[in-house]
Image (cartoon, helix red, strand yellow):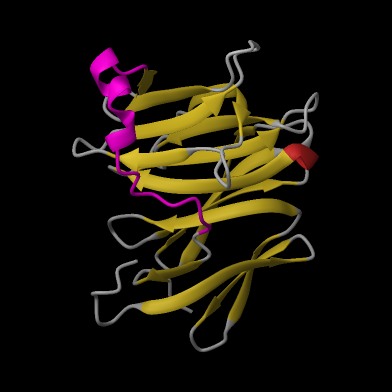
Amino acid sequence: MHSSIPDIKPFYVYTNRNNLYIKNINEHTEKLANNVHTYCANIDDSRRIHICFIDIHGKLIHLTNEHSHWKKKIICSVFSNIKNIKNMRLYIINNFLNLFIIDKSPISENLFRVSHFNFSPSNYKVFKYHINNIVKDKESIYKLNIDELSNIVLEYKSNPNSSRGYKNNIMVFNTLSRTWVVPNTLLRSSNSDIFFNIKDDLFEYCYSLIYKI
């Protein structure tokens, strides 16, 4: 990310024994938090790093660096059982943080839930949405795309509890109204032509101009 900017400083965010650390290119390491279960990170348009993590008590916490100081905010309690969490991803669109968390169903090894948390660091008013009964499609539990209007397009397979097999689903998150909608029939019929431009990988290795030791 931001590889075209010549004066960027690379850094690495990682955990060790439930402690969250950040290390810069000069190998200087700073401890950011403890009791961390899982985390994710990304960079906004101002090249400021945002880190979201779930602690061992199931609370969602946001970290960002302002004027060389780390600001910590507890967002909400999200999980009573953190053992079922598979992973979490953070995407920043129009200064809103979009956090996607996958947790495994407690009643079936083959079913998952995707939880979406949308909020702005300016007021932390959280929008929440949950999608249940998702089945894994090859190596992917869901796929994401950002369209030309900055809306989030999510594709997943579900188990309709019938003998017809799995069902393909597409939902769109309108980033202006902050609502999830089912697209019209025309879009759903052409979903095979949608190019998903977000990979399901972890943004651990990031760049920033704002973070300074």
Task: Point out residue 179 in the picture as x, y percentages from the top left corner.
Answer: 37, 20
Q: Which residue is situated farthest in the left direction here?
A: 148
Q: Residue furthest top?
A: 162
Measured as percent of width and height from the top left, residue 1 is found at 34, 66
Q: Quadrant of residue 65?
A: bottom left
Q: Is residue 40 left or right of residue 6?
A: right
Q: Residue at x 53, y 28 (%)?
A: 157
Q: Report whether 138 appears left or right of 36.
A: left
Residue at position x 58%, y 47% from top?
A: 139
Choose between 70 and 41: the one closer to the eye: 41
Q: Position of residue 178 (x, y in %)?
A: 35, 24
Circle count? 0
Q: Is residue 197 magenta?
A: yes
Q: Is residue 103 above or below residue 10?
A: above
Residue 144, image x and y in percent?
Answer: 40, 40
Q: Is residue 50 visible?
A: no
**Residue depicted at 49% across the width and 60% down the height:** 203
Indicate left or right for 172 with 62 as reference: left
Magenta residue check for 62: no
Secondary structure predominantly adopted by residues drawn in magenta: loop
Q: Is residue 170 left or right of residue 151?
A: right
Q: Nearer the viewer, residue 166 or 62?
A: 166
Q: From the viewer's perspective, is residue 12 above or below residue 87?
A: below
In the rendered view, tell whether residue 53 sits above or below residue 162.
Answer: below
Identity of the residue drawn at 61% across and 36% down: 136
Find residue 175 and report its image quarter.
top left
Residue 104 visible in the displayed image: yes
Q: Residue furthest bottom?
A: 26
Part of the protein shown in magenta: 182-202
